[in-house]
Image (cartoon, rainbow, N blue to C red):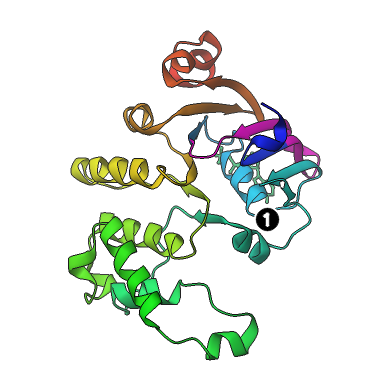
Amino acid sequence: MSNTDFLLAIEDLSVSFDGFKAIDTLNLYLDRGELRVVIGPNGAGKTTLLDLICGRTAPTHGSIKFKNQEMTVLPEFKIVRAGIGRKFQTPSIYENLSVFKNLEVSFPRGRGVFGALAFRCTPDVRERIEQVAEEIGLAALLMSEAGLLSHGQKQWLEIGMLLMQDPELLMLDEPIAGMSVREREITAELLTKICRDRSMIVIEHDMEFVQRIAHKVTVLHQGKILAEGQMDAVQNDPRVIDVYLGH
Ligand code: ADP
């Protein structure tokens, strides 16, 4: 497979903060339809890696190609437009608005102030909202106030807000933090379903959850890839046990 066949191809990526290398000459390739989980001890560089991919942080060196287009030269909003969506750990939904409105405001609008003002909830947008609400299991709660949802439902709503932008790659930072066992199960099913026609990078600590959802696991340590592959192989790798799983 050549590097141009991957959805995402990261090569020689480095970023330094005051001389400290948070990401150090990293290469990572993601297939279309792949669900990759990134694990690693605190401070390994996981969040920084997602920050680099979504354009929040500029690299010191290296390349990030998404569908063969260089992302490191683009501002954050153009990276979103190119098809990369990012969800942070804390939900950032509009608590006072309904589930419907939260999804509606996440629909991509025309450019600039005029594009935003000209926006109308057309039948197409309504249909998209209903599809997404169905996908995230909130179809029966479309008119409910988002602030009244459970913690898990808020997380799913935020994933739905990302889906409204129709990204080809979703990046999620610890999506099951604070969830009940049942909510975790539903989230595993949701992420698996989403990856039928999209790709995903997930940062996660819960190994049972990782085992359940990951197609492939990347272990980061001190800004470098320590191990990569199927979960079974990775978790039996002595280097991984030494720096991470064994602790
Ligand atoms: P992880 O998500 O794996 O816990 P991070 O990516 O948050 O790790 O951080 C990796 C390292 O980079 C840490 O040592 C952190 O302190 C450092 N770091 C991250 N962002 C910055 C920043 N903006 N300025 C200085 N240091 C940073």
Q: Position of residue 237 (x, y in %)?
A: 50, 11
Please indicate whether residue 78 sits to the left or right of residue 143 in the image. Answer: right
Q: Residues within 10 Å of mark 1 (few under 14, many from 20)?
A: many
Q: Pick whichever, 155 or 116, lies toward us.
A: 116
Q: Which residues are magenta?
A: 11-34
Residue in the picture at 27% in, 47% down: 179
Q: Is mark 1 within 8 Å of ligand 1?
A: no
Classified by dominant secondary structure, the portion drawn in magenta counts as: strand
Please indicate whether residue 139 sits to the left or right of residue 38 in the image. Answer: left
Q: Is residue 27 magenta?
A: yes
Q: Position of residue 21 (x, y in %)?
A: 74, 36
Q: Is residue 90 visible?
A: yes
Q: Position of residue 222 (x, y in %)?
A: 65, 29
Number of on-image labels: 1
Please indicate whether residue 198 sits to the left or right of residue 8 in the image. Answer: left
* Residue holding disc 1: 55
Residue in the picture at 26% in, 42% down: 184
Q: Position of residue 192 (x, y in %)?
A: 35, 40
Looking at the rendering, which quadrant does residue 100 occupy?
A: bottom left
Q: Is residue 23 visible?
A: no
Residue in the picture at 76% in, 38% down: 14
- Say which amino acid is labelled 1: Gly
Residue in the picture at 52% in, 13% down: 242
Q: Pick whichever, 219 or 168, lies toward us.
A: 168
| Image quarter (top left, top right, bottom left or bottom right) of the C terminus | top left
Looking at the rendering, which quadrant does residue 133 occupy?
A: bottom left
Q: Quadrant of ligand 1?
A: top right
Is disc 1 placed on a helix, strand or loop?
Answer: loop
| Image quarter (top left, top right, bottom left or bottom right) of the N terminus | top right
